[in-house]
Amino acid sequence: MLVMATIHSSSIAQAIDRIVSFFPVESQKYILSRLSLILKGIIVQELFPSLTGDKALIPAVEVLLVNDTGKKIIRDGDWKQLPDYILRRKPLEMQTMKKSVEDLANKGIIDIGYLKKPS
């Protein structure tokens, strides 16, 4: 069964934190255990204006594929480790948001200066 959900978050760690925060504190350990068993992957995207000038939006993505180590990190409630874990597992095609944005900026697709502008 494929289930897709949207959650407003800027990182995978924040998405997991938000999911868990919907539940009472006394249930959160159980929820983390269940999440670790059912999650197959998480993708977080952020849209940036294209440098082409055509008002297109380009997605930068953070990707987590949940394997045994990822399950353990989630089950233990230590999702703050996820960015480092993703960086170490590059052959599995996972990536952090920072790396995705840097790659798009280095290719001249988006302006990294956009990140530094006050909102």
Image (cartoon, rainbow, N blue to C red):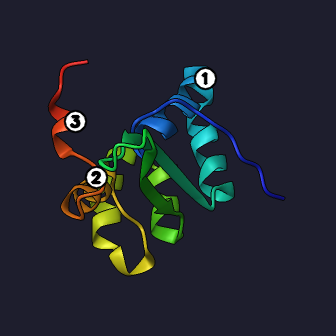
- Label whose residue precedes the other's in the sequence (3 or 1): 1
Q: Mark 3–mark 1 contact, CB under 8 Å?
A: no
Q: Which residue is mark 3?
A: 114
3 or 2: mark nearer the eye = 3
Tell me the amino acid under the disc marked 1.
Answer: Phe
Q: Residue at x 19, y 20 (%)?
A: 118
Q: Is residue 73 above or below residue 65?
A: above
Q: Residue at x 58, y 33 (%)?
A: 7
- Label whose residue precedes the other's in the sequence (1 or 2): 1
Report helix, strand or loop for mark 1: loop
Relative side of 47 to 42, left or right: left
Q: Residue 105 sits in which quadrant?
A: bottom left
1 or 2: mark nearer the eye = 2
Q: Which residue is mark 1?
A: 22
- Measured as percent of width and height from the top left, residue 36 is found at 59, 54
Q: Residue at x 24, y 64 (%)?
A: 107
Report helix, strand or loop for mark 3: helix
Q: Is residue 99 above or below residue 4?
A: below
Is any part of residue 17 visible from this angle? Answer: yes
Alpha carbon separation for disc pair 1 and 2: 29 Å
Q: Quadrant of the N terminus?
A: bottom right
Q: Which residue is mark 2?
A: 101
- Measured as percent of width and height from the top left, residue 58 is found at 42, 49
Alpha carbon separation for disc pair 3 and 2: 11 Å
Alpha carbon separation for disc pair 3 and 1: 32 Å
Relative side of 87 to 20, left or right: left
- Measured as percent of width and height from the top left, residue 113 is found at 15, 39
- Measured as percent of width and height from the top left, residue 51 is found at 29, 48
Relative side of 46 to 106, left or right: right
Tell me the amino acid under the disc marked 3.
Answer: Tyr
Q: Mark 1–mark 2 contact, CB under 8 Å?
A: no
